[in-house]
Amino acid sequence: MDQFYSNRSIFQVLFVTLVLGAGCALLTGRAIALTWRSIWVAAIAMIPLGLAVRFVHFALFNETLLQPKTYLVETAILIVVACLSFQRTRARQMVRQYYWLYEPSGPLGWRLRQDAPAKA
């Protein structure tokens, strides 16, 4: 961790990256899924959020602002959280909105119901 952050406090890193940043990523992934947009929109939206997380590290804890490795790692974490949130929300949407056609298949998926109407 010392190679990514100049500050040695793991609590600051966890708070900013995982609590603030991942919390925003979770809500962003959910909001994008609820508006029926693509998962790529959620992934691309994490690029500026990664910059914002990097800025919070810089502004509050005197970290270096432009650290490419750290930015890439933080943005990758945000993309994973946003995509998982997106997929969870989309699965719940499909099962709830098309209950006669789909049933849950795990926390992130859905499948065609056995008693679904046949295609014409």
Image (tube, rainbow, N blue to C red):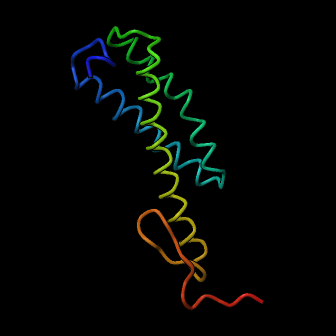
Q: Quadrant of residue 71?
A: top left
**Which residue is drawn at the image coordinates 30% and 29% (left, top)?**
15
On the rendered image, what quadrant is the C terminus found in?
Answer: bottom right
Residue nearest the observer in this picture, 67 or 56:
67
Residue nearest the observer in this picture, 7 or 59:
7
Question: As displayed, is residue 1 above or below residue 18?
Answer: above
Q: Quadrant of residue 1?
A: top left
Q: Horizontally, is 65 left or right of 102 in the view?
A: left
Question: As displayed, is residue 69 above or below residue 30?
Answer: above
Q: Horizontally, is 88 left or right of 99 in the view?
A: left
- Residue 6 screen position, x and y as percent: 29, 11
- Residue 16 screen position, x and y as percent: 35, 26
Question: As displayed, is residue 112 above or below residue 42?
Answer: below
**Which residue is drawn at the image coordinates 44% and 11% (left, top)?**
65
**Which residue is drawn at the image coordinates 56% and 26% (left, top)?**
48
Q: How many marks?
A: 0
Q: Quadrant of residue 53?
A: top left
- Residue 37 screen position, x and y as percent: 66, 51
**Which residue is drawn at the image coordinates 30% and 24% (left, top)?**
13
